[in-house]
Image (cartoon, helix red, strand yellow):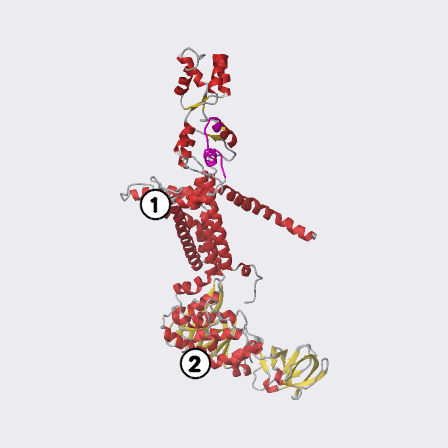
Amino acid sequence: MRRAHLLGLGFLSPALAIILMLFLIPVLLTVMFSFTNMSTATGISGGAYEINAASLRKLSDAGAQESFVETLGKEAFVVDDAGITAAAAAYGEQFANEVGSQMLGERFDSRRDLERAFRKLKSRPRSTRDIKKAADLFKRSVLNVRFETAGGLLDAVTGNGIEMTPDQQELLTKTIYTGWTWTSDNFALMAQIPYVWRVAGNTLMYVVLTLAASVGLGLFLAITTFYLPSGTATTFRAIWFFPRILPNVIFVLMWKWLAWDTGFLSSLLGNFGVPPRNWMLDTGANAWVFIVLINGIVGASLGMILFGSAIKSIPQSMLHASEVDGASRWQQIRYIILPQLRWPIMFICAYSTLSLLTSFEYILLSTDGGPGGATEVWSLMAFHTALDNYAGNLQYGLGAAMALMLVIVGILASLVYLRIFNFNDLVAKPRIEQ
Amino acid sequence: MRISIENFTKSFGDTTVIEDMSLEIGDGEMLALLGPSGCGKSTTLFAICGIHRMNAGRLLFGDADVTEVSSQKRNVGVVFQNYALYPHMNVYENIAFPLKVRKESRAEVDRKVQEIADLVHIGELLQRRPVQLSGGQQQRVALARALIRKPDILLLDEPLANLDAKLRLEMRSEIRRIQLATGITAVLVTHDQVEAMSMCDRIAIMDKGRIVQLSTPKDMYENPSSAFVAGFLGNPPIAFLEGTVADGGFRLANSRVTLPVPSGIELPGDGAPIRFGVRPEFFQPGNPLKVSGKVSFVEIQGREELYDVTLENGAVLRSIQAQSAGFRLGEDVSWGIAQDKVLAFGPDGNRL
């Protein structure tokens, strides 16, 4: 490789590093997480095996036979070497030997059965209390015991005299594992939850309405400022650019002040007898109006700049020509200006669709998806599911699967856009002579 | 339709471009506004079509005062220097645009577009986009668009400036043909005297916001009112000799040579500085009033040849002669001036 090539690679490396760190690695991690069932409950490191009331419930939910679940949950009394050794220490060798010789390996479902068997022995302890205590030495249970490996658990269960088919073994270890596992269930789950479909609808509405508002307002501002004297136009553009350079939190805070039940709107309308209320979160429709306005006004500034410069690049003589051709202002806008803004409008639509799909900061700050999920959009849902769940169980795996959907939609949309905009044409050498 | 501009004044900010200008253009006439760049000719044109508002004065189309009428309502067709075709419409839509904004019926538009396209010979190009057209074709489309709604007046702003030399020649006669065919009153803005002279009935020469002379091409060429006009018309241009009045004759500056003054010229007193203008075709070897000099420039143009002759005092005279005269650079010659064709100008540049 020539030195010049190395130099080029050197200049490129910061960009490559940024793409790697901020795009490729996060996307790969998202893909990875989306195929797990990670959550607060499972943790992100390994887990353990433990049979308890909750895991038994899970087991029967997962379709295990009732008798099997019952057996697992029951205490059992098993005459084994460990019990005999303990009995020898507590009640003497004689009793222990007798138990060992007559009952080794026997299994009893309840303490009473074992007690009854003890009473038949000659060297049994004299008092009923001692017999009960001796029986307790043989109590064997896998309930509420943590096992680090599946093998340990299975050995313990079998050791208790519970017979399991291979299917039952697999079901048991799979169901009661407390750590995360690989799974593709997240995607099926997403399709099944009705709320997810509602959020998908919300997202579509959010993108379409916000896009319409920002492009419409951007066009309106670009055209009106074009016809204003330049000094006035610059002032107006600067004012309309404010929302974009204002910190998001402050911008949304101002909207909240406007909409609070003690805020500007309520105070103003209070004079006309309208009872105060939170105008932003009062109803779903109200929340949507604010979401679209907040995002639309921020988006409009970009459109205004882009459309404004595009209008300025239309030769003055073309506008003059349309005037002497008899076109009114409106016809001039309709037939001369707008058709020549086709590309900038398409560009803004394409660009904004992608950024709107993934951006939720203004919604998070203003309504946080409320009221009652009315303004929850896909990216916000992914955020809520994975990182900010009200119930407290953060479902990283499901959230990642939701985010992955956005990545896929984004990549597909980009490919479509590149085709529409004919990327090869865009990067072709400029043709100065028309 | 007759156009009357009365006491027209136009200023941009503090700069007054045109001051108190009056001009009358007859019905069906084609008039050229000719002048160097910055003389206000385009400003005048834009004032006539209403793109610029007049600061003072009146503008009449026929008997109607249109000073305050918007450009949309003036019914004026304009051909712009860069044609200003709408790039997103095809030729048909471009031409039909003035009718479209008036919401004329489809059939009517079709008929008119076809008619005007045939007039300007672009009938087979209607489905093309402007970028697919040559300069001359774009020019024809612009003309058709300007003419389609039968405007009262046609304004042409440097219509040939963007064309190559051959097309310019062709379009010159085309525009004149179409103007005559439609009988429309037309105003042509140009800085090219050949265009103005070859296309127009009358020429208004402008300088620094004023009309210096208004006349027919032939009269203006033969009887320029000032040295500026004489210098502007004619190619190769007129040559000037500086000198003073001496004993009823013209004494060349820095020289003892005295030339007789043509009859009918009122000379100022002795010693007053005056200038003689001699057009190249009136400085020929065969003429009687000889002056001597050295050939300092030769240009062979095929049909004719151009010579510059530097006189002893450093002044330069130009001559245009038929082919094969065969003079060489550096040759000493003694050629004659046609005495009765000499134009004399006073110290202020005005004709004597």
Q: Nearer the viewer, residue A195 or A71?
A: A71
Circles 2 and 1 on the same subunit: no
Looking at numbered disc 2 in the image, what kind of residue is underneath it? Thr
Q: Position of residue A375 (x, y in %)?
A: 38, 45
Chain identifier of the residue bearing label 1 in the image: A
Q: Nearer the viewer, residue B102 or A177?
A: A177
Q: Position of residue B102 (x, y in %)?
A: 37, 70
Q: Nearer the viewer, residue A256 or A408?
A: A408
Badge 2 crowding class, 10 Å Cα cut-off, few under 14, some 14 to 19, many 20 or more, is: few
**Residue mark closest to the camera, 2 vs 1:** 1
Badge 1 crowding class, 10 Å Cα cut-off, few under 14, some 14 to 19, many 20 or more, is: some
Q: Quick one: quadrant of the C terminus of chain B? A: bottom right
Residue B244: image quadrant is bottom right
The boundaries of the magenta stretch are A156-181
Q: Which residue in the protein does label 1 denote?
A: A284
Q: Is residue A110 visible?
A: yes
| Residue at image location 52% in from the left, 60% down from the top | A422
SS at circle 2: helix
Q: Is residue B200 visible?
A: no
Circle on res. B182: 2
| Residue at image location 56% in from the left, 83% down from the top | B266
A213 relative to B111, above or below: above
A26 relative to A143, above or below: below
- Inspect the magenta stretch and tell me whether residue A171 lies in it: yes
Circle on res. A259: none
**Alpha-carbon distance for marks 2 and 1?**
66 Å
